Image (tube, grey):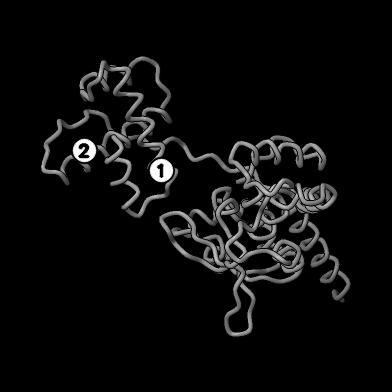
Amino acid sequence: MDDFETWVLARPSAASTARAYHKDLRHLHAVHGGALDPRKLTKHFSRGVSVARRNREACAYQAWQAYCASRGVETPPLEYQVKNPPKRVPKTLEPEDFEALLAAARGMGRRGDPARLMLLAGLRRSEARSVKVRDVVRRSGQRLLRVVGKGDKERHVPVAGDLEGLLDELCEGQDPRAPLLRRENGAAWGASTLNSLMLEVGRLAGVSDLHPHRLRHGFANYLRRLGVDVRVIQDVLGHSSLETTQRYLQVTPHDVQQVLGAMSRDAARRNSEAP
């Protein structure tokens, strides 16, 4: 099993994917009496297991099959077709929510830095935890934040405005090798602690059910409101597919009001010009 996890990590996969596969396989191995029998897995899937869990465990088994094949070992196929669940429209942030969250995070001092960074740079939770002081770089006169995302893909987030001020605060007097985000006691932020922190920031700002990835959605819509082209937003977020970026950029009630206002102003202009 440990060798399997190492094998997955050596592929273009996120570390969290490798850990999830490893965890799911160990669970299946234990549940089925120390064996990975696809017939037992199919029976296991028929016992009211959710579609999301079935998909996850089936993907883990398929990765196990690929690993075994790379070692010249044949494994029986799994008689289960991974089914993509219906795509849910992700919750984004209204402009007033975006501003309220920034204000709430600023009011928390250093504890609010993770929320500010994720709002202003569109980072995933894992990226916010791993980015370092030395990742604030300068190229061709432009200051950039170097981010290594899923599948070890590197991208650069332009630094300006509020983000520039925040990075100045985070980098001042720090070792280049130090994490960009540190807790008040100097320790690194844990994943579950960040989740709890976001809920706290959300409560202060009046935004319910706030989680780290929702800040990334808010950043994408913030760029769109500034008039940034969707393909540029895709590049800044590090999305492989434009479709993923477009799902982030959902139409909000604020956008509808803007359309209605523009149509009303255009009608008033034409009426005023009519003979």
Q: Residue at x 44, y 59 (%)?
A: 240
Specify the label residue 17 is tagged with.
1
Element carrying mark 1:
helix
Q: In the picture provided, is 266 more to the left or to the right than 26?
A: right
Q: Residue at x 32, y 24 (%)?
A: 28
Q: Is residue 69 above or below residue 38?
A: below
Q: Is residue 112 above or below residue 266?
A: above
Q: From the image, which quarter does the C terminus lie in?
A: bottom right
Q: Residue at x 39, y 37 (%)?
A: 84
Q: Nearer the viewer, residue 116 or 172?
A: 172
Tag 1–tag 2 contact (CB < 8 Å): no
Specify the label residue 65 is tagged with.
2
* Residue type highlighted by circle 2: Gln
* Residue type highlighted by circle 1: Thr
Kindly tell me whether residue 157 is visible in this rendering: no
Q: In the picture provided, is 243 more to the left or to the right than 164?
A: left
List x then y, in percent, for residue 122.
62, 57
